[in-house]
């Protein structure tokens, strides 16, 4: 929604600006705006990975290499002044938010909280000296496959035998405490992933509040062993078609025109997006991720969802990709992050 985009660039409303910074540029040709870019300085990423990594985000540009070069030149100059030596993106403004450009799957609409970019972006970025740094995969999987595949059933039974194991839905009555538990799990389970940036307490809470507006508690799961959280899975109804129907606004001239269009389209949503799944290192290779997916599949069927997009998954994450493929998943879209030296 347009209001969410305004919050993204608001220094008052976006917790990213508690420690990070971004400089926003517009490209104009005469009086017409023909492009935009954000140069992003993220100290939390540098502290986690070491070095001085600059980012670019919010990239949008007409099909004109001169405009694209002007945008990257401005962003690079600002990042060099902050002491950065490399440029990576697009990232808005951390890898915990929307990132990447679409490189395959242009005939399909994006899932909720995933980007869609024109095919010519790849050419523009490469003409500006950027090269692919990492590929991100979106997998399409049927709920029936996820629940009934023999491998899924076998691994789920294996994980369910862990002493003290319990899978439960998120308790919205204790939402703040649940958010804290999820953040701890997320930052621990994902900390060794390529490009990971730890989410601060305020950043994670802001994202959780955004997701809560559309979430179904049955699709937000926590795995516990003797009451201690050891894994999680976050799944949202894919409300992207409803957002498109609303045209980015819930109210026009004071009337809830967009809201009515949103709810009408939301009632027809039959898909979900698996946003994130994580398991603590000591409980990996024990089938716990498959047990979480199996429980999600059961809940999805009860709620009337027939398919899910698992996105995004690092192309370098062999175990995760092999697991989704073995459950009948297929790669439906490919995204990429690009980089260059400054």
Image (cartoon, rainbow, N blue to C red):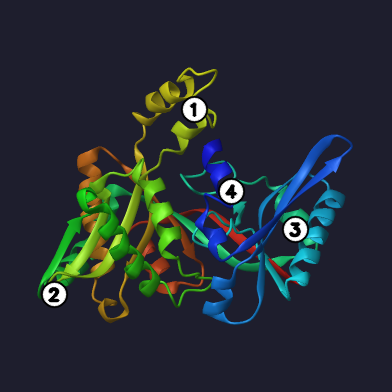
Q: Residue furthest right?
A: 30
Q: Residues within 10 Å of mark 3 (few under 14, many from 20)?
A: many
Q: CA distance from mark 3 to mark 4?
A: 27 Å
Q: Do we see residue 109 in this rendering?
A: no
The mark nearer the N terminus, 4 or 2, is 4
Q: Which mark is residue 245?
A: 1
Which circle, 3 or 4, is nearer the viewer?
Answer: 4
Where disc 1 sits, the SS reads: helix
Where disc 4 sits, the SS reads loop
Distance Cα–Cα, label 2 vs label 3: 48 Å
Up-down relation of residue 205 to residue 193 (above or below): above
Is 285 placed above or below 334 here?
A: below
Q: Residue furthest front?
A: 12
Q: Quadrant of residue 135?
A: bottom right
> Residue 10 has which mark?
4
Q: Could you give the CA–CA distance between mark 4 and mark 2, rounded to whole angstroms? A: 46 Å
Question: Which residue does the image show at 53% across and 53% down from the upper left?
Answer: 14
Residue at 33% in and 55% down:
234
Q: Residues within 10 Å of mark 1 (few under 14, many from 20)?
A: some
Q: Earlier in the sequence, mark 1 or mark 3?
A: 3
Q: Nearer the viewer, residue 19 or 332?
A: 19
SS for callout 3: helix
**Apparent side of residue 273 relative to residue 175 in the rendered image (left or right):** right
Location of residue 141 with respect to 131 vertically, above or below: above
> Is residue 301 or residue 71 the one in the foreground?
71
Q: Earlier in the sequence, mark 4 or mark 1?
A: 4
Asked if residue 34 lies left or right of residue 162, the reply is right
Q: Secondary structure at mark 2?
A: loop
Residue under the point 27% across and 81% down? 282
* Image label count: 4
Residue assigned mark 3: 125
Point out residue 330 in the picture as x, y percentages from the top left corner. Answer: 43, 55
């Amino acid at each position: 929604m347009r209001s969410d985009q305004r919050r993204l660039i608001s220094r008052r409303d976006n917790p990213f600006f508690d420690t990070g910074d971004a400089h926003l540029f517009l490209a104009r040709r005469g009086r017409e705006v023909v492009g935009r870019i954000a140069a992003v300085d993220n100290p939390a990423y540098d502290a986690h990975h070491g070095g001085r990594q600059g980012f670019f985000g919010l990239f949008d540009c007409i099909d004109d290499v001169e405009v694209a070069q002007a945008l990257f030149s401005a962003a690079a100059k600002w990042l060099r002044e902050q002491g950065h030596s490399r440029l990576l993106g697009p990232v808005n403004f951390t890898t915990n938010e929307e990132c990447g450009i679409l490189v395959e799957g242009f005939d399909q609409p994006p899932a909720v909280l995933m980007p869609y970019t024109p095919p010519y972006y790849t050419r523009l970025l490469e003409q500006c000296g950027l090269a692919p740094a990492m590929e991100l995969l979106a997998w399409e999987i049927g709920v029936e496959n996820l629940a009934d595949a023999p491998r899924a059933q076998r691994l789920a039974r294996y994980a369910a035998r862990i002493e003290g194991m319990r899978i439960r839905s998120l308790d919205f009555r204790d939402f703040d405490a649940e958010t804290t538990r999820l953040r701890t799990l997320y930052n621990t389970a994902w900390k060794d992933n390529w490009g990971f940036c730890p989410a601060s307490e305020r950043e994670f809470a802001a994202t959780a509040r955004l997701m809560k507006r559309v979430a179904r508690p049955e699709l937000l799961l926590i795995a516990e062993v003797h009451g201690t959280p050891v894994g999680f899975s976050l799944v949202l109804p894919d409300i992207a078609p409803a957002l498109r129907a609303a045209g980015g606004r819930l109210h026009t001239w004071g009337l809830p025109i967009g809201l009515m269009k949103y709810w009408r389209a939301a009632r027809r949503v039959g898909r979900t997006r698996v946003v994130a799944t994580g398991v603590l290192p000591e409980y990996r290779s024990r089938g716990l991720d498959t047990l979480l997916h199996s429980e999600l599949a059961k809940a999805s069927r009860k709620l009337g969802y027939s398919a899910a997009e698992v996105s995004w998954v690092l192309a370098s994450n062999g175990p995760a990709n092999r697991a989704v493929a073995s459950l009948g998943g297929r790669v439906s879209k490919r995204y990429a992050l690009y980089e260059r030296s400054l």
